[in-house]
Image (cartoon, rainbow, N blue to C red):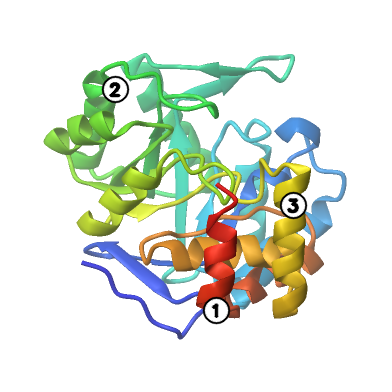
Amino acid sequence: MTDVTGTVPGGTLTPADGLTLTRMGYGAMQLAGPNVFGPPKDRDEAVAVLREAVERGITHIDTSDFYGPVVVNEIIKEALHPYPDGLHIVTKVGARRGDDGSWNLVRDPEDLKAQVRENLQHLGLDALDVVNLRFGTVDGPDEEPLAEQFGALAELRQQGLIRHLGLSSVSDVQLTEAQVIAPVVTVQNLYNLANRQDDALVERCAAEGIAFAPFFPLGGFTPLQSQTLTDVAARVGASPQQVALAWLLQRSETIVLIPGTSSRAHLRENIAAADLVLPPEEIAELDRIA
């Protein structure tokens, strides 16, 4: 069951009882240093970005302990703890960072449980609103069974350490496999104007009331595609980035956005995209990009 309103940027989405997310969220990944590794260049600005996001009505913040690592969660705690009522922090487990900044998938169930506890500690929480199991890579799912790993997180949900569960970088088959074990409230996969391999999964999530959070919502455009985007943006009086975000919001009513930035000015531009309504003819031209 979904509930979309216009009282906050982009309205809200309720994918499960007790969980209501603003459709325009905020992805905290870029608050770390270069390549999502180490401390930010300007920690004060990072804190200010988070506080302004909440002040502007965003109640959906996406993060992970492997951003930094740890750095981003510690900044979120510094900026927002004690957390205001209604703010939902969505985190993910399934990877650890090497000393060289490498991204290493971790699938051992006990390590996944340890990652949950580390997120709790670094965020200063007794329970996590949503934990996504990251199972594949940014290039997509790998089709391996995930029941053992998702089951480990379901155990923590039963213990009260996690309220809701989600998936990241997974396939349609893996979503079905997970749903046998516990409810799935969100799927976080690569998807944007130029990368639409998950069109069918977006439709399924809409039909089942599952929030679909595209990562890299602004990435992957060729020069020709960028020109199309630029032309549409000029006609509607917005930036290309705003048009790309607005297209996603209009693509499906269960899409939620988590664009990231380390700049307050860029944050305001992203939030403004929630008020941009693209005419049908512009949607049709943008659809041809894929």
Residue found 60% across the figure and 78% down from its top: 276
Q: Position of residue 214 (x, y in %)?
A: 50, 48
Residue 131 on image: x %, y % = 38, 42
Q: CA distance from mark 2 to mark 1?
A: 43 Å
**What kind of residue is marked 1?**
Pro
Looking at the rendered structure, the kind of residue marked 3 is Ser
Comparing 189 with 12, the one in front is 189
Quarter-of-image position of residue 64: top right
Distance (Cα) linking label 2 and label 3: 39 Å
- The residue that label 2 is drawn on is 149
Above-or-below relation of 252 to 67: below
Instruction: Tell me where residue 192 appears, x and y as whole percent.
Output: 55, 49
Q: Determine the CA span between mark 1 and mark 3.
A: 19 Å
Q: Is residue 218 above or below residue 265?
A: above
**To which residue does mark 3 refer?**
226
Q: Amino acid at mark 2?
A: Gln
Contact between marks 2 and 3 (CB within 8 A): the answer is: no
Judging by the rendered image, the residue that carries numbered circle 1 is 279
Foreground residue among 122 and 40: 40
Q: Secondary structure at mark 1?
A: loop
Q: Is residue 25 visible?
A: no
The one nearer the camera, 14 or 152, is 14
